[in-house]
Amino acid sequence: MRERFWELPIDTLDRKEWEALCDGCGKCCIHKLEDEVTGELFPTNVACRLLDRHSCRCTNYRDRKAYVPDCVRLDARSLKTIDWLPSTCAYRLRGEGRPLPEWHYLICGDRDAVHEAGVSVRGWTVSEDEVGDLEHHIVDRLL
């Protein structure tokens, strides 16, 4: 990987650099409900069954589409059309030309900093395998 690759334009990153940009917050793996009339999104505390809710990383990232067919594959092209990424997301920030936050592991060197900063989903989610109706799991959290 190139030195300080995260400061380069996001569409110039190679696959390895792209994957390394992920901050590990797990917010993209949280189920969201959409109001059919307004289009507004409401986050829930329900995580994808493949999310390790402690590390906030996918337990089967390579083959996730086989188990979760509607899992979104994020790339530089799709980034431009996805409006539900959290405001803290490294992909979103860099796509908007903004710097990474101080708690991002590429800046501070600590993978746990995202959790210590309270920016990840660690500690407040349940697995989709443990819940019923998602409407009962809407949370009042900024994503």
Image (tube, rainbow, N blue to C red):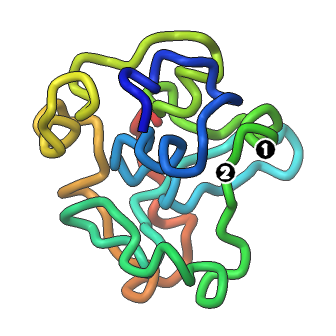
Tell whether 41 sits left or right of 107: right
130 up-or-down from 138: above or below: below
* Position in image of residue 53 (x %, y %): 27, 67
Secondary structure, mark 2, is loop
In this rendered view, identify the residue nearer to me: 116 or 128: 116
Q: Name the residue under label 2.
A: 74
Q: Residue flagged by tag 2: what amino acid is it? A: Leu
In this rendered view, identify the residue nearer to me: 87 or 125: 87
Secondary structure, mark 1, is helix
Q: Residue 116 carries which label?
A: none
CB within 8 Å, label 1 to label 2? yes
55 up-or-down from 58: above or below: above
Tell whether 21 sits left or right of 82: left
Crowding at dot 1, Cα within 10 Å, few <14 / some 14-19 / many 20+, comes out as few
Quarter residue 78 falls in: top right
Quarter of the image with the N terminus is top left
- What residue do we see at 13% from left, 44% from top? 112
Q: Which mark is residue 78?
A: 1
